[in-house]
Amino acid sequence: MMQFRKLTICLLFILVSAMQAQPVKRIYLGNDDHTDFMWIANETDYNAAFVKMLDYYLDQIDATKSNPEDFQARFNCDGSYWMQAYQKQRTPKQFERLIAAIKSGHISMPLHPLINCYGGMPTEAAFRGMFYAGQIERKHDLRFSMAGSMENNTIPLGMSSIWAGSGAKYSWYGIGGYGSQLSYDYRADRRNQLYKYTGLDGSGVLMKWYMYDEKKTAPLGGYAETRTAIPAKNPVQEISTMIPRLEAMCDTISANSKYPFNAAAAFGYGHDDLETYLSPEFIQVAKNGTTPSRKVRVAILEDFFKDIEKNYPNLPSETVTYGNEWDLLSASMNETTAKMRRSTEKLRSAEALASIVGINQPDFDNDLEDLKNTAWNSFASYWEHDWTGDSKVAMEQRPAWQIKMQENLTVYTDSLFNRSRKSLGNQLQKSKNPRFYVFNPLGWSRSDVADFEWEGDYPFKVIDLEQNQEVSSQIIMKSGKKYIRLLASNIPSVGYKVFEIKKRTAKKVVNELTVANETISNKYYQLTLSPSGAITNIIDKLSNREMVKPAKGKYFNDLGVEDINHGSPIVVENSGPISVTLKAVSDLPIKHTTRVTLFANSPDIVIENSIEGNFDDVKTWSFSFNLNNPTTQFEELGAVLKARLETNGGHYASQNARYDWQTFNHFADLSEENYGITISNLDCSFFKLGESSIYSLDENASQIHALAGGRIDKKVEDGNYLGFPKQNGEVNFNYNFAVTSHQSSFDATAAMKFAMEHQNSFVTGIVEGAKGTSKKTSFSLLSVSNPDILLWSVKPSEEGIENGLITRFWNMKNTAQTATITLKSPITEAWKTTHIETNEMKLIPSVDELKVDFKQNQINTFRVLIK
């Protein structure tokens, strides 16, 4: 009997010891209010709700500060727009209270402004939308480490590097089932639920993206993981149900576990509500749920990620794109979206000009500060995810708000551009003969055509003053105005040359451009334009091959006319020794105009399309290439991707992704082994590769369809289309493309340079400075030694040019690179900064040079101060 008792005690001791050895499960509950901006209320009401909620949670934080750490009030904002609204509507002292709560870890504020659909955004727009957060970081000595997106079912690959390069460490993704064209089974199963979301440069963020459990009332993997009832009935009971579910997820023993972690989190309660006030409820649930074997914490999002980061440093990595879904809805107001894209590109020239002007006149644009911050808010807001257009507020007010966001950006960009352009002309000394400058906003020397508006009516010749020689020129008409078009050679990087107009007869130039009916030719191509605006053939003379091969009844630049000969007779416009343009006008399938231009000394084909009429269906410009099983590569968002599945050596995820529409930023390129064709695009946000569908990527297609506009997706619930109908009544649409061939395999540097040159034309301005201003006939602000390191932007610091120039560069190579940046004057100080301009590491310049390193495919941002 005694031995039996001893055995029993021993077994109990072993059992208790084993129980004590089991690690404590760590459960994190994050409260928030999901922001569906202007979906159930107007702009004013949302701004008021943000401020009211923050006041409430700040009071709750103060009231519970003596509680144990896990049971204190905390709240998670899902956008820095909340902070901005609070700053505008509250006193500086009240705002400092909010800053203190962020610093103490009681309120989480992310870098991103609102919940955006990133797949439709230009790369620079993603940076600029986070500029407000950067301003707050520098002014209040704090750093934001969270970023994210939710509800939309897809995300582009490049956001990982963009977020990481802007200072983010963590992200979470909670999707929604509403409006998705992807089936539940396809979206539900994920290969990783915690992973390193890694960009092509190797940087990234720790990502939480749980399997989407739509079959349960509160879907883990959704964007309101703690919510089980809509409307809320018993929040304490609802939130409490999440604890055993999260605990059951944790499994640190089984090798086959789909979640081999001892910590789990449920984020979000607000769902689509305008306001959420649930602090005591979350605290009560955490208290009730905490046991000796389970710790439950009322958390900000960072609490969970720091736990994972500390205890699980070797997470799996994903470097894939998931394509586009709700991102596509911005094409339902395509011209407004195109204006956002054009202003984004024009900003590059405006800021480069401002950088040069500001060196000598630092306060020349001080009065534009409010316009500038409003423009950054437009980047932050325009691609906000509620483009569905299926609520009363959205349908009645959202289109006008989208237009307001676009106009805010356009007004600032145009104001800075026009101010800088005129100011540069005023800093250069005029002469008795008319003079003008030609400015190159890009970071490499280039030769191209330049157009200078001209009202003179006498014979003239144009002199390159730096070379003291005449340059070829001709008169053209654009939009009812007369211009001198000249060939401007060797315009320096981020710099200019000065030209003079003399009242003399220009020298005769051999015209190498020919026109014969519907066909134009130069030394590079022979091209035939049909009356419908479709290009029926392009002979590449350098390789002696046809570039066009119709597919599925579509030619090249084809809007979809069954009879390509339907239209008015072809008209020759602006013919001369520099360029010649053919114009086609057709009324099918809708009235549209096409202009195609060839140049005497350029292997570029420039295409200008317009649609003059309203439409509600999906329209595309199709381009059919005479290529055999090409590989398509394109700029998505902050990354140049290969349009193949990861299992076939590409960048598309082999599961959970949507494949039918690719992001169309600066370019797409279709290439064989030793030949390819690059198309530059300014105005379209997306293209379809061949016959790609939602679940299938047509990897070897030799045809792309640039999305001219339309509503792509239907609501599963009622079959109505998402987005805004009939392009919000718009009747004028513009589309700018350029095409070039290359007798080699794909080169990302060459493709991006071609597209940037097409979309960033030389800027011209009259020289009219008074006596004593600069007599320079050429100037370069900066240069880069490595041709594969492209200057992406140069601008005055957000806090003024006295705080330096901000320079952003992109390594286009798949290997690490080193480059030397040379400035016009000695560099006094330099830093590597985040993309939102917060200093990270001080650099050591050598007089006027700064040597910098780049990882493969990396975008880097630097601050430089010069004498």
Image (cartoon, rainbow, N blue to C red):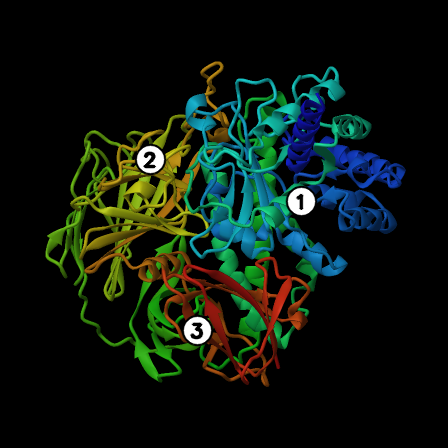
Can residue 617 be seen?
yes
In the picture shown, does residue 849 fall above or below 546? below
Badge 1: few (under 14), some or many (20 or more) residues near its Cα, within 10 Å? many
Which structural element holds mark 1?
helix
Q: Which mark is residue 819?
A: 3
Q: Which mark is residue 620?
A: 2
Please tell me whether mark 1 or mark 3 is closer to you in this view.
Answer: 1
Apparent side of residue 284 relative to residue 175 in the rendered image (left or right)? right
> Which residue is under mark 1?
302
In primary-sequence order, the first of circles 1 and 3 is: 1
The amino acid on which the numbered mark 3 sits, given as a three-letter code, is Ala
In primary-sequence order, the first of circles 3 and 2 is: 2
Which structural element holds mark 3?
strand
Please tell me whether mark 2 or mark 1 is closer to you in this view.
Answer: 1
Query: Measuring 54% from the left and 75% from the top, which residue is drawn there?
Result: 768
In the picture shown, does residue 419 fall above or below 360? above
Task: Count numbered badges in the picture.
Answer: 3
The amino acid on which the numbered mark 2 sits, given as a three-letter code, is Thr
Badge 2: few (under 14), some or many (20 or more) residues near its Cα, within 10 Å? many
Q: Quadrant of the C terminus?
A: bottom right
Query: Measuring 38% from the left and 39% from the top, which residue is drawn there?
Result: 653
Instruction: Kindly indicate the quadrant of the structure image that contains residue 378.
Output: top right
In the picture shown, does residue 632 fall above or below 179? below
Residue 725, horizontal then vertical, whole percent:
48, 25
Q: CA distance from mark 2 to mark 1?
A: 44 Å
Q: CA distance from mark 3 to mark 2?
A: 41 Å
